[in-house]
């Protein structure tokens, strides 16, 4: 998805013109991936523009920073309001929001401790991640030959720039094979997630998903799906998922800020269930969009008004 410039980027405490938000080519993050970031969406509605999961995303950003021993130069509240300020300044009705904290310019050894930390917030318009119609028709996927980082190697619970080499390899391979997205297994061969989405399975009226600790990113949208499932009284099993479930489930869907809730229509050329969006996916997807688009109450407190 192409980045569409907006008027401003928040850079170390100030809104500056988009084209002036630059860093030096010898910034530490460019060489070693020493940054942490978030992907957040703001939705337009009759109630105005509202940011989805702002506090959960900001909490994850600070936890990611702490996993990388990256001292945040701004307090939680200051960065939280910087997100709202940037969306307001860019006058978006709906947009994608990218807060990013990284080791900047100054030192160039592997040890980042002496490099300064810079923080930016960028916002721009963004549609359906996996293509128009994907949320209705589902997407074709394939199991990646790359495995997800093993526990104790990269901190997969951190949304850290360097981790995304793994995701990039997974999605590039998937596209070479004609799939919209790849599904990556852990070192033991159990299902982890997509390159940028968590994954859910429906089998015998039960919702299954890999647990935190299965080398996944703890998705904010994953948390929303679990809340909706609990509200609907759907049994949920957070447990290791054998690869076989990719080929024997009634329904599979992805959750993520960018992908929202997207059905998986096939895995490795094998059709999932009836090959179209299944009833439980439809139900959870509708419940999700009703809330974020303001067609019903924000009963879980997911949304923060921008004004
Ligand atoms: C690797 C990975 N897993 C899962 C997710 C879904 O997380 P969230 O729902 O917080 O966007 C993302 C997207 O941020 C991701 O990059």
Image: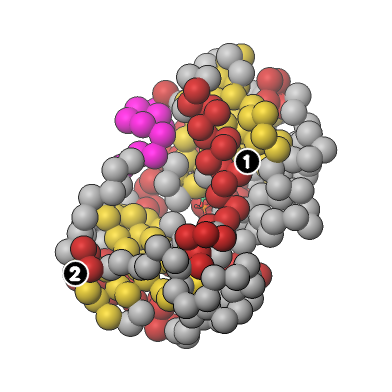
Colouring convention used in this rendered image of the protein? secondary structure
User: Taking the image as drawn, is residue 91 in sight?
Assistant: no
Crowd rating for badge 2 (residues with CA inside 10 Å; few <14, some 14–19, many 20+)? some
Magenta span of residues: 127-136
* Prevailing secondary structure of the magenta residues: loop
Residue occupied by mark 1: 193
Outermost residue toward the right? 188
Whichever of callouts 1 and 2 sits on the residue coming sooner in the sequence is 2
At horizontal 50% and vertical 64% (from top left) the residue drawn is 29
Regarding mark 1 in the picture, which secondary structure is present there? strand
* Along the viewing direction, whichever of 193 and 145 lies nearer the viewer: 145
- Give the image quarter of residue 244: top right
At horizontal 41% and vertical 34% (from top left) the residue drawn is 130
Q: Percent position (x, y) of residue 292?
A: 37, 53
* Along the viewing direction, whichever of 109 and 137 lies nearer the viewer: 109
Quadrant in which the N terminus is drawn: top left
278 to the left or right of 5: right
Q: Percent position (x, y) of residue 267?
A: 60, 21
Q: Residue 17, which numbered label? A: 2
Instruction: Tell me if the residue at label 1 has its CB under 8 Å from ligand 1.
Output: yes
């Amino acid at each position: 998805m192409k980045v569409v410039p907006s008027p401003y980027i928040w850079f170390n405490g100030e809104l500056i013109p988009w084209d002036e938000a630059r860093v030096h080519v010898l910034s530490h993050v460019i060489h070693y991936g020493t940054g942490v970031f978030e992907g957040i969406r703001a939705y337009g509605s009759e109630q105005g523009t509202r940011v989805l999961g702002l506090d959960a995303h900001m909490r994850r950003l600070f936890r990611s920073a702490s996993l990388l021993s990256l001292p945040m130069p701004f307090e939680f509240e200051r960065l939280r309001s910087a997100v709202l300020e940037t969306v307001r300044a860019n006058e978006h009705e709906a947009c994608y929001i990218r807060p990013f904290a990284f080791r900047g310019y100054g030192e160039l050894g592997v040890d980042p401790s002496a490099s300064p930390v810079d923080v930016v917030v960028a916002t721009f318009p963004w549609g359906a991640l996996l293509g128009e119609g994907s949320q209705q028709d589902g997407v074709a996927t394939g199991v990646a030959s790359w495995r997800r980082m093993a526990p104790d190697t990269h901190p997969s619970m951190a949304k850290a720039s360097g981790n995304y080499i793994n995701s990039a390899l997974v999605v590039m391979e998937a596209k070479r094979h004609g799939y919209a997205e790849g599904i990556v297994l852990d070192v033991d061969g159990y299902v982890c997630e997509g390159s940028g989405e968590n994954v859910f399975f429906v089998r015998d009226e039960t919702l299954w998903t890999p647990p935190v600790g299965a080398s996944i990113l703890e998705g904010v949208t994953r948390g929303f799906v679990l809340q909706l499932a609990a509200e609907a009284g759907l049994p949920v099993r957070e447990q290791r998922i054998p690869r076989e479930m990719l080929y024997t489930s009634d329904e599979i869907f992805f959750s993520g800020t960018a992908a929202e809730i997207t059905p998986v229509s096939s895995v490795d050329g094998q059709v999932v269930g009836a090959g179209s969006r299944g009833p439980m996916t439809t139900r959870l997807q509708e419940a999700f969009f009703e809330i974020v688009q303001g067609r019903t109450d924000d009963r879980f407190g997911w949304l923060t008004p921008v004004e």
